[in-house]
Image (cartoon, helix red, strand yellow):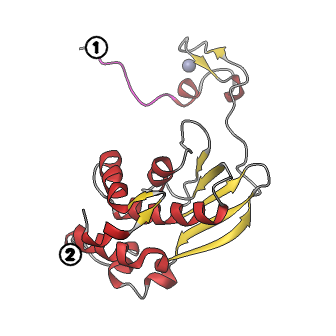
Amino acid sequence: MHALASDLKLCGRPAGRVLEEIERFHGFPAPGVVIGAFMVDWAQEVIGPRVEADAIVETLRCLPDAVQLFTPCTLGNGWMKVLDWDRFALTLYDRATRRGYRVWLDAGKTAAHPAIHDWFLKRVPKDALPLEILLGRILEARRAVLSCRSVIVTDFLRRPKKDSIAICPGCGEAFDPRAGDCCKGCLRGGYFKLDSA
Ligand code: ZN
């Protein structure tokens, strides 16, 4: 465990455990997921413990894993929406009031933290910035590289629901008939061919 992490609590657990959980889930303690833990921690703190928050994440990279690890929101349960917008930002919000907090990695603030800035803006090759060094800087910087604003969510509120099921005439498998007359796989031609071996 990183020495700097010993006194720190994140998302309700010691930072050392956060790093271990990230390593187990994500494969290694990825800087983006560690920063994501600080982001979730901040959003959870301001939204308060009594709100069962849903999440919207604005990038496919790293950040969804932080939300899935440290909140009850997952892609599978539909409480987390993931937008392919490539912005390193997330929002936790109260479904009932639509009020919440958006936290983002702020490029203006990372400028004062060169290692994080270089990693964030991909200014240096990966092997020029050892993971241990970068993680140390992230654990030092904590929320200093983040920004947080209160927001009211206006879109992406709908949780996915399966209202009806049909059997696809193309493949014979069950699908959501809102997709059309046959399933999306048959519509667009699928992603595999059968291996006859
Ligand atoms: Zn089909």
Q: Is the shortest distance between ligand 1 and the CB of mark 1 under 8 Å?
A: no
Q: For the residue marked with disc 2, what is the amino acid?
A: Ala
Circle 2 residue: 128
| Residue 86 seen in the current view | no
Instruction: Check the image and name the residue furthest to the bottom.
Output: 112
The residues colored magenta run 189-196
Which of discs 2 and 1 lies nearer the camera? The answer is: 2
| Residue 97 seen in the current view | yes
Disc 2 element: helix
Most foreground residue, 64 or 177: 64
Q: Measuring from the top left, give residue 183's x and y in whole percent.
A: 60, 23
Instruction: Check the image and name the residue furthest to the right.
Output: 97
- Say which label, 2 or 1, has the lower sequence index: 2
Mark 1 neighbour density, 10 Å: few (under 14) some (14–19) many (20 or more): few
Q: Main secondary structure of the magenta part?
A: loop
Q: Is residue 53 left or right of residue 172?
A: right
Q: For the residue marked with disc 1, what is the amino acid?
A: Ser
Q: Residue at the location (53% across, 49% down)?
A: 71
Q: Residue at the location (56% across, 45% down)?
A: 73
- Residue 196's mark? 1
> Residues under labels 2 and 1: Cα distance?
46 Å
Q: Measuring from the top left, give residue 118's x and y in whole percent.
A: 35, 79
Q: Measuring from the top left, give residue 15's x and y in whole percent.
A: 37, 62
Q: Would you say the residues marked 2 and 1 are in contact, meaning their CB atoms lie under 8 Å apart?
A: no
The C terminus: image quadrant:
top left
Q: Measuring from the top left, give residue 9's x and y in whole percent.
A: 43, 64
Relative to 161, say whether 120 is above or below: below
Q: Is residue 150 left or right of residue 135?
A: right
Relative to 152, say whether 168 is above or below: above
Q: Residue at the location (30% across, 69% down)?
A: 135
Disc 1 element: loop
